[in-house]
Amino acid sequence: MHLSHSAAMRLGSVALCLSAILAAPAFAADAPAAPTAECELHVWPSGGIGVHTAGLGVAFGAIGGLIDAEGRKSGDEVRAEAASTAFGPDRQLATLVADAPAAALHIPAYRVVPHDKPLDVKAIGTKLRHSDSTAPCYAELITSGLLFYKGPIYKGTLTVAFTYLKFGAKPKATSSYRNEFRRALDIADPRNAASIAEAGDRFAEIYSQSFKQFASYAAAQPAWK
């Protein structure tokens, strides 16, 4: 078969293009997807549970209250140690992580990053990032206080406080929300250290209930301060 010069030129061009296409590496198919900024929710437990018990001395004014507190100081230290052992930082974190904090706070895309070392009390009050993360999509949830109180009449309560901070690209929080919740402990003998030490499940229950309530309030805040 005889081809004209122009037809032969066109056929040669098509063959050259086909060979170039077949030889070219499949960059579009093999190239990984462009990385996206990962959102992080960093969470911290409390350093321990504070304990304050009061007797009938509080009925006699400020002086009576001071005398009463001084007389119970050493006992409260023992009770605080028992409470902190029953519901220490490790168990707090386990309880919090089990409650899916990112989803509860309506930020499900955030990866939860637990910190087992509690923050310093003074550091909690600052609105700067408390970790060395540089993620541009970043938030913090801090257990900012746990207090067991036993008055002269009631069986005892546990107050749980949380602080929630959200950040932009800068190190200072763009918004913050703090709240605390108090619930009855219902311990059979709230002044007895051994009884307190066995109340870990009750501490965990109240802690979980308090966080869920906190999260529902935090997610509904129209504009944090």
Image (cartoon, rainbow, N blue to C red):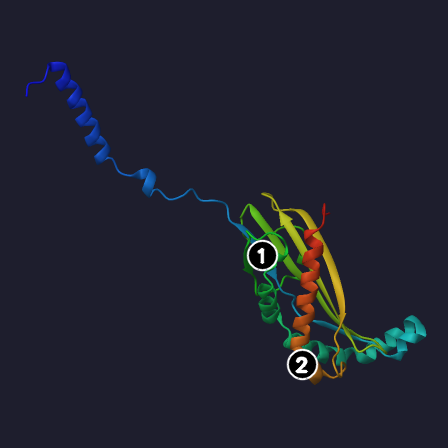
User: How many numbered discs?
Assistant: 2
Residue 129: give its label.
none
N-terminal label among 1 and 2: 1
Q: Is residue 121 visible?
A: no
Q: Quadrant of residue 103?
A: bottom right
Density class for disc 2 (Cα within 10 Å; few <14, some 14-19, many ≥20) is some
Which amino acid lies under the numbered mark 2 shown in the image of this protein?
Ala
- The front one of 189 and 125 is 189
- Residue 204 against residue 196 in the figure, above or below: above
Going by the picture, which residue comes out furthest to the right? 60
Judging by the rendered image, the residue that carries numbered circle 2 is 197
- Give the percent coordinates (x, y) of residue 84: 66, 74
- Residue 89 against residue 177 in the figure, above or below: below
- Residue 11 against residue 172 in the figure, above or below: above
Tell me the quarter of the image containing the N terminus: top left
Residue 42: give its label.
1
- The front one of 123 and 178 is 178
- Give the percent coordinates (x, y) of residue 93: 59, 66
Residue for point 64% across, 49% down? 166
Residue for point 58% across, 61% down? 100
Going by the picture, which residue comes out furthest to the front? 1
Q: Viewed as shown, does residue 129 lie left or right of 23?
A: right
